[in-house]
Amino acid sequence: MKKLAKYLDLFLKVGFWVLIILSPLMIITMVGVETLMNNPAIPDTLKLETNFVYHGLSFVMNSNLDNYNYMSWLSVIELLIGNSVLLYNIVQIRGILAGVLEDNPFSKQIIKCVKKLAYGIIIGSLIFSTTQAIINYLSLNHLNILESLYQAGIEVNYTFNIFENSLIVEGLLVLLLAHVFQYGLQLQEEYDATL
């Protein structure tokens, strides 16, 4: 068990630093491409045009400057939120592994980390789902896709289901596990007090 915990801790440590290093690089790349798109020397013929079909209606999305700037900043916001939640959860898992490596699975430190991990999963899932829905809605409105559908006589109802593709149930299960660990610690303390 300790060997697995060591390997997992090493993997998470590497993953943590990869995220720390790659997140700013991805943002710098997005800003660099945006700067390149702002360059007046690039002719409009080199800019991209995407055709897509949705329920028999054909749409053309030009990568004009306004659309690209708007979409790139929405992507940066989504990237920052997603990576922040992921980094927080990695720190909590590494705290749990530290307790496992010390042969103390029912310590207060592990229980605290498991509870924080559960809350991180639940809150992170809610934040990420909400952010994704807002970004999708803003993107559809900015690219005039909804307006085009309305003009074609198609009624569009944009619904937001916060529980769709979320990890709330998993977070609640981790929280239940934290309470089981807390109960185990309480039993251990009672047992030690009777001896």
Image (tube, rainbow, N blue to C red):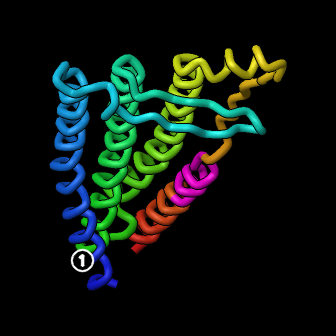
Q: Is residue 191 left or right of residue 42?
A: right
Q: Quadrant of residue 82 in the image?
A: top left
Q: Identity of the amino acid at label 1?
A: Lys
The foreground one among 172 and 35 is 35
Which residue is pictured at 76% across the width and 14% down the height?
151
Which residue is pictured at 28% across the width and 52% down the height?
91
Q: Pinpoint residue 89: horizontal percent, then vertical percent.
A: 36, 50
Which residue is pictured at 73% across the width and 33% down the height?
57
Q: Is residue 22 left or right of residue 152?
A: left
What kind of element bears circle 1?
Answer: helix
Q: Pinpoint residue 149: horizontal percent, then vertical percent.
A: 73, 22
Give the magenta part as a residue range: 166-177
Neighbor class of circle 1 (other Cα within 10 Å; few <14, some 14-19, many 20+) is: some
The foreground one among 100 and 3 is 3
Quadrant of the rendering where the C terminus is positioned: bottom left
Q: Pinpoint residue 172: horizontal percent, then vertical percent.
A: 60, 50
Q: Is residue 31 above or below residue 24?
A: above
| Residue on which disc 1 sits | 6
Q: Pinpoint residue 158: horizontal percent, then vertical percent.
A: 72, 25
Q: Is residue 14 above or below residue 59?
A: below
The prevailing secondary structure element of the residues shown in magenta is helix
Q: Quadrant of residue 41 in the image?
A: top left
Quadrant of the rendering where the N terminus is positioned: bottom left
Q: Quadrant of residue 103 in the image?
A: bottom left
Residue 49 included in the magenta stretch of the image: no
The foreground one among 60 and 90 is 60
